[in-house]
Image (tube, rainbow, N blue to C red):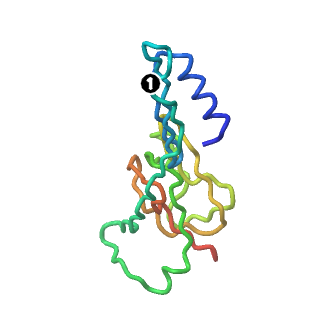
Amino acid sequence: MRETKIRKLIRLVEQSDVNELEVTSWGRRVRITKRLAGPNGHSEQPAVVGHIPQPKPKEKPPVEPSGVESSASSTDKKYVEIKSPMVGTFYASPAPDAPPYVKEGQNISVGQVVCIVEAMKLMNEIESEMAGRVTKVLVENAQPVEFGQVMFLIDPEK
């Protein structure tokens, strides 16, 4: 979290009746505690601002669609994974009645939107960082995704 954002949060706590505020963003947690004045006018506890380290989420193996055998063959190793950059809900299309951004077998280019991950009521378009062919879509529409979860397998050789 950036220093400017932390300073704004501190000002927010100082100017409100809130005694403590904890915010989590991108795997980092910040807790701000207001100093409380005692009967003699001195603070009873110091203000605490600090980063609380978050454990790294365990990466889950990709979920294979039903009817597909999971194998660790050498052909699977050439695929590049597109992983979720955040925890949220996966959407394959911009609207429920719209066609999906990408389908299995479709060629994609760098910067092309491949899906949306909704996090905290914000729709985040996820763009491809490589060109290639979508070999597998590993997430179903409206399914929750974890940080680092593989959503697509891309064959960069087209």
The C terminus lies in quadrant? bottom right
The furthest residue to the left: 67
Q: Is residue 99 in view from this perspective?
A: no
Which residue carries the number 1 mark? 44
- Near-viewer residue (22 or 111): 22
- Near-viewer residue (20 or 85): 20
The furthest residue to the bottom: 74
In the rendered image, residue 81, in percent from the top left (x then y), is placed at 53, 67
In the rendered image, residue 98, in percent from the top left (x then y), is placed at 50, 43
Q: Is 121 placed above or below 140 here? A: above
Side (left or right) of 106 relative to 143: right
Give the crowd class for mark 1: few <14, some 14-19, many >=20 residues within 10 Å: few
Residue under the point 40% across and 67% down:
62
Q: Is 153 placed above or below 35 here? A: below
Q: Is 48 placed above or below 67 here? A: above
Residue under the point 54% across and 66% down:
134
In the rendered image, residue 20, in percent from the top left (x then y), is placed at 45, 28
Q: Is residue 112 in view from this perspective?
A: yes
Side (left or right) of 118 relative to 66: right
The mark tally for this picture is 1
In the rendered image, residue 66, in percent from the top left (x then y), is placed at 30, 67
Look at label 1 and name its amino acid.
Answer: Glu
Helix, strand or loop at mark 1: loop
The furthest residue to the front: 40
Residue under the point 63% across and 62% down:
108
- Near-viewer residue (66 or 150): 150
Side (left or right) of 127 relative to 13: right
The N terminus lies in quadrant? top right
